[in-house]
Amino acid sequence: MPADFLFDPPDQPIVPVEGEARVFPVRRIFCVGRNYAAHAAEMGNEVDREAPFYFTKSAQDICLSGGEIDYPPGTQDCHHEMEFVVALDTGGFEVSEAEAMGLVYGYACGIDLTRRDLQGAAKEKRRPWDLGKDFENAAIIGTLTPKGDFGEIGAQRIVLRKDGETVQDATLAEMIWSVPEIIAHLSRFYTLAPGDLIYTGTPAGVGPVSPGCVLEGQIEGLSPLRIGISG
């Protein structure tokens, strides 16, 4: 018997796929912290090769490329963080590194928006980062490209431009933890599933956004990303 909902359930967050009429339904969003040495250094942190660490965003935070969003509420210091996003279409628990890429459907350009002042205040008090990381439109994403069309992950350039000026510029080869390592490690703590997205960390050059600015992200081999910030 169908459930009789108290109110209409939220729409399923989706991401378009390059060359496909079908779309990718988003289940969960995992994010890797400090996965580029230069970014860790600019934030005053040492690189830790002992194990990657994570935070999460709600699936409802998904914001598709091409539009305009309001400047996030409750912050005076919202930052951009350009990222390589991995999309899974197969699940698994305690997956080995050798098996990890078998879970991957494809990749996309992404931006992790961060309310840096709220994140910083939480860190000082040793509290969770949720207010700084998990909010509406905080997980911006471009069109997905199937992994076979992208090819092997290597030294592809990852770039973010703010109002036409390059502010983040690195290569995927600079990631501390590789995609197979991340998937294998994450699967020790979660049963990964189709629809999961992994934002794999940001290179150096993060900085503030402001009302009226335009962010344009690009990774070689992927559809570019563009978003405007309104006042």
Image (spheres, helix red, strand yellow):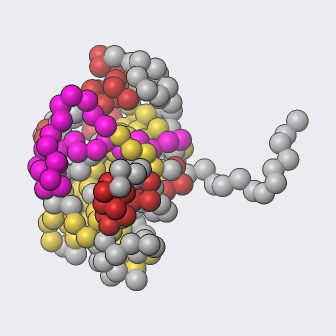
Q: Position of residue 203 (x, y in %)?
A: 18, 51
Quick check: is 108 in the magenta stretch? no
Nearer to me, 126 or 111: 126
Question: Which residue is at a point 37% across and 64% down the rendered structure image?
Answer: 118
Q: From where the camera sits, is residue 156 visible?
A: no
Question: Which residue is at a point 60% across and 50% down the rendered structure image?
Answer: 12
Query: Residue lying farthest right?
Result: 1
Drawn side of residue 6 relative to residue 70, left or right = right
The quarter of the rendered structure image containing the C terminus is: bottom left
Nearer to me, 122 or 54: 122
Q: Position of residue 162 (x, y in %)?
A: 22, 70
Drawn side of residue 36 relative to residue 75, left or right = left
Q: How many marks?
A: 0
Q: From where the camera sits, is residue 121 visible?
A: yes
Drawn side of residue 195 relative to residue 213, left or right = right
Location of residue 119 (image quadrant): bottom left
Q: Is residue 130 above or below residue 179?
A: below
Location of residue 153 (image quadrant): top left
Question: Which residue is at a point 27% across and 57% down the rendered structure image?
Answer: 81
Question: Which residue is at a point 32% across and 54% down the rendered structure image?
Answer: 123
Nearer to me, 77 or 187: 77
Drawn side of residue 40 relative to residue 100, left or right = left
Nearer to me, 17 or 117: 117
Q: Position of residue 82 (x, y in %)?
A: 26, 55
Query: Residue lying farthest front?
Result: 125
Quick check: is 49 in the magenta stretch? yes
The quarter of the rendered structure image containing the N terminus is: top right
Magenta residues, start to end: 27-53
